[in-house]
Amino acid sequence: MSEQNLRRDVRLLGKVLGDILHNQEGPDLLNQVESIRKLAKQARSGDTGSWDQLRGLLKELEVSEAKLVARAFAQFLAQSNMAEQHHRIRRRRSYLASETFLKRSPDEVFRSLIEKGVDPKELLNITSNLSIELVLTAHPTEINRRTLLQKYNTLESILSELDDCKEGSVQEDLALNSIRSVLTEIWLTDEIHRQKPDPIDEARAGLLIFEQTLWDALPTFLRELNRSCQKHLGASLPFQAAPIRFGSWMGGDRDGNPFVTPQTTRHVWAMARWIAADLYWREIDALRSRLSLNQASKDLQDRVGNVREPYRHFLREVRDRLDNTRTWAAALMEGQTPPDLRIYRHADELKADLMLCYNSLCSTGAEIIAKGKLTDLIRRVSCFGLSLVRLDVRQESTRHSDALAAITKHLGLGDYSSWSEEQRIHFLNAELASKRPLIPLDLECSEEVQNVLDTFKEIAITPSGSLGCYVISMAKKCSDILAVELLQKAAGVANPLPVVPLFETLEDLRHAGATIDHLLSSPSHLQIKDIEIMLGYSDSAKDAGRLAATWALYKAQEDLLRVTQAHNVSLRLFHGRGGSVGRGGGPLRLAIQSQPPGTIQGSLRITEQGEMIQSKFGLHEIALRTFEDYFSSVVNATALPSAPPKPEWRSAMELLAGHSVIGYREIVRNHPNFVPYFRSATPEQELGALNIGSRPARRKKGGGVESLRAIPWVFAWTQTRLLLPSWLGSGVALNQLLDSEHKDVLLEMAQEWPFFRSTLDLISMVLAKALPDIAQYYEERLVPSDLHNLGKELRSRYHKAVEGILITTQKERLLEDNLTLERSIELRNPYVDPINLIQAELLHRIRSNNSDDQLKDALLITINGIAHGMRNTG
C-alpha cells in the first residue's frame, strides 16, 4: 500500500496540532515552533549557518518557552508514531481484503513450507504442540502515562473511521472534530509521571493490557489459525492447543527491588486471578443470554435436571462459581482469610464445564453455535488459564547463598558463603536427599534473609497455576541452582517451581554448558526430563558489547543444546531480550531466524518489556500482527532450521568477538575518564526523576557502569543519540578482519549466514539512527574540556564502525535495503534535533546549581520527546 495515506495523516495531525498551539498558547508560540522546525530542516540538509543559528536560538530560550517548544515537538513525534501504527493496521487490512497472502500470516507460512516439502501432518503436529510464552515485565522503559496511551489509542480508532469517510461528508467532519478534541485533551494533559509507582501499581497497569486488547485479540488469532489449519493441513486446531501463553515478572521480580515483598507477590497473583474471573464472568453472562435453547444432551440434562432452558440454568451455576472466585481473590488481595466458597481452583474445572456445553450443542444439531463464542471461550481457558499470566519469581543468586549461610552458621556447620563449590554441592545434595527439616524454628537472621525465606513460604501456599518458574539472576555455578531447589524443599513447597538459571555475563555464558552438565550429573537431577535456562541479552551486552555478547549467546545455546541432548533432557530456552538493540532487541523475525539450529523446537519463552508491551499489543490489530510474527518465526525455525555455520565462519566470528570485546572494554571498563565522561555527557544522573518504574536504577549504591542497570545505561546513550552500547567494539573488530586474510570469509558471512547478516543489519540500523554531531553538542555544553578527547575518540570509532559495516555488507549507504526506515529517520531528525539541543541546555542550567522545578519539568518533557523520536528508550 502507498505511503501517501500515512503522509496525509501526519500532515493532518501536524496541522491540527498547529491550530491547538495557536488557540491555546497564542500565535507567537506557533511562529516560534515553525521557525525552529525550518531551521532544523535546513541544518539537517547540511546548512551549517542554520545549525549555528538554531543552536543560538534554542540556547537563549526562557525555561517557559523551552518547555512549550519541547512539548510541541514531542507531541508531534508521538502523533506521528500513532499514525505509523495506524498505517500498519491499514496495510494489514488491505492485504486481507485482497487475494494476496499476508506475509508471515498462518496462511502464508503453511503455503510456503508445504511448497518447500514439509509434510502437512508434520506442520499440524508442530502447530498443535507449539508453545510460545510471552513474559511481560515491568522494566521501566514506558515513558508515557497510561492516560495519554489511552488517548492515543482513541486517536488511532478515529483515524480508522476517517479512512472510511467520503471527502466532504458529515462523517468526515465529525471525525475531524473528534481528532481536534482528542489532540486538545492531550495538549492540556500533564505528560509527566508525578509519582513513582510501586510494584502493585506496575502490575495493575500491566494487567490492563489483557482487558484492553489481549482478551479479544488472542481468540481472534486462534480463529484465523484454525481456519488456516483446516484449509492447508486438513484438520482443525485441537482445543487443548495453546500456541501462545503469557507470563509476567510484575510483582514477582525482586532482584534489586526491595519493594517487592512476599505480600506483593500474593497481592499480584490474586489480582490476576480476580481479573481473569471477572473477564470469564462477563463472557459467561453474555453466553447465557444467547443460549436460550431447550434441547440438550443427556449429560447436560443429568447435571441440571428437568429445566426448560438447560444451558442458561447450567451457565448460571458457572457464573456464580466465577463470582465466588472473584470474592475469594479479592479477600486475598486485601490480606484477609478468604471465605470458604465453591470456586474454580484449576483451569481444567472450568474447561470441563464449557466442554459439557460444547458437546451438548454439537450432539443436538447446534454445532454452528458451539463453534462461535463458546469455542473462543474454551480456547481462552487453554491459553489464559485461571490467572491470565503465570507469575515468575526472580531473585539474585547471592541472596540465596546469604540465606543458606545464616542457616549453616546457626546449625554450627560453618559459613556456607565461604565454602568451595565442591563443599556447597556436597552439602546441597545431601540435604536434598535428607528427610529432616533444614530451617530451625529459632533461626535468627537479617531482614534480607528473612525476606528470602518468607518468599519460599509464600510459594508453598500459592495455588497451582498462579506461578511460573523461579529465575535466578546472575547465576554462575551449579550450586546456585541446587540452593533454590533446597530452599523450596525446606519451605515445604509440594509442587516445586522449575528453577531457571539466568546466565547474563560474558564469563557466565561461556561456562553455561559446563554448569548445566555439572547440574545434570548430580544425584538429584539424574531423573529429570526437561530443563529451562534463561539467557540475558541486556547485561551481557553491557558487559562485553553487543557484537561479542551476540556470539557468546549463540555459542551458549549450542553448548546447552549439546549438553542436554547428551543427558537425554529436553531444553527450553528463555530469552531475556529488551526493546532496544543495545539490550538484545530488534525485529523478531531476524532474531529467531538467527538462532542456532535445533534450539527452537516448537518452544520459545521470551520477555516483552516496558514500552514494547504497548507497541506490540496496545492495539487489537497490532496485537494480531505480533502473534502472527511470533507464530510464523517459530514454526519456520522449527520446520526448517537454519544450517550450522561453516568452520571458517566460526573461526572468523571468534576473532571478531575477541577484537570486539577488547575494543569495547578498553573504553567502558579501562579508560580512566569514561565514567566521568558518561555521567557528564548524558542525562544518566537525571533519569531517576522520571518516576516510570519502582526499581532503583542501580543494583548497588555508588560504583561505576558495572553497578548501573542495563536499562538506564542504554536509555542515557539513546537520549544523546550516540547509541554507543549497540555499536562500540564492532568497528574495531570488523576493520581488523577486513585488513587481514579473513576479509573474503567476512564478506561471504555477510551474504550467506543469517545469524551474521541479521547482526550486521541491526548494527547498521543503530548506526543510521545515531547522530554524533548531536552527541558532540552535549559534550560542548556539559563535559569538562579535559574530557573532550574521549568524546573525539568515541566519534572517531563511530565513523570507523560505519565504514566497517559498509565494506562488509558491500553497500554504499547503511539503510539502502530499507528505504522506508531510511526515509522515516530522515523525516524525524529535524523534529528530534531541537529537543536534543533544548535538553543539553536544560542539563547545563540544572547542573549549574539551578534546581528550579520548571527546569526539571522541561527536562522530563525533552526525555519523553526524544524517546518518542527514537521509538524506544532502554
Image (cartoon, rainbow, N blue to C red):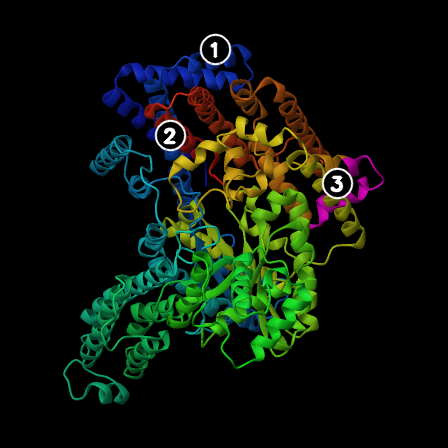
Circles 2 and 3 in contact, beta carbons < 8 Å: no
Which amino acid is tagged 2? Ile
- The spot of residue 179 in percent (x, y) is 27, 35
Residue for point 65% across, 37% down: 669
- 821 displayed left or right of 145: right
Residue 752 located within the stretch drawn in magenta? yes
Kindly state the secondary structure of the residue where label 1 is placed.
Answer: helix
Is residue 289 visible in the rendered structure shown here? yes
Kindly state the secondary structure of the residue where label 3 is placed.
Answer: helix
Is residue 817 visible in the rendered structure shown here? no
Q: Give the mark, 2 or 3, whose residue is nearer the N terminus.
A: 3
Query: Which residue is the site of mark 3?
Result: 659
Which amino acid is tagged 1? Gln
Circles 3 and 1 in contact, beta carbons < 8 Å: no
Which amino acid is tagged 3? His
Alpha-carbon span between mark 2 and mark 3: 39 Å
Residue reaching furthest to the front: 412
Name which quarter of the figure residue 154 lies in. Answer: top left
Judging depth in this view, the residue of 786 and 833 nearest the camera is 786
Alpha-carbon span between mark 3 and mark 1: 42 Å
Q: Which span of residues is magenta-colored?
A: 736-755
Q: Give the mark, 3 or 1, whose residue is nearer the N terminus.
A: 1
Name which quarter of the figure residue 120 lies in. Answer: bottom right
Kindly state the secondary structure of the residue where label 2 is placed.
Answer: helix
Residue reaching furthest to the right: 741
Query: Which residue is the site of mark 1?
Result: 53
Judging depth in this view, the residue of 828 and 568 nearest the camera is 568
State whether residue 751 is above or below residue 254.
above
Judging depth in this view, the residue of 36 and 365 nearest the camera is 36
Determine the main secondary structure of the stretch shown in magenta.
Answer: helix
- The spot of residue 226 in percent (x, y) is 43, 67
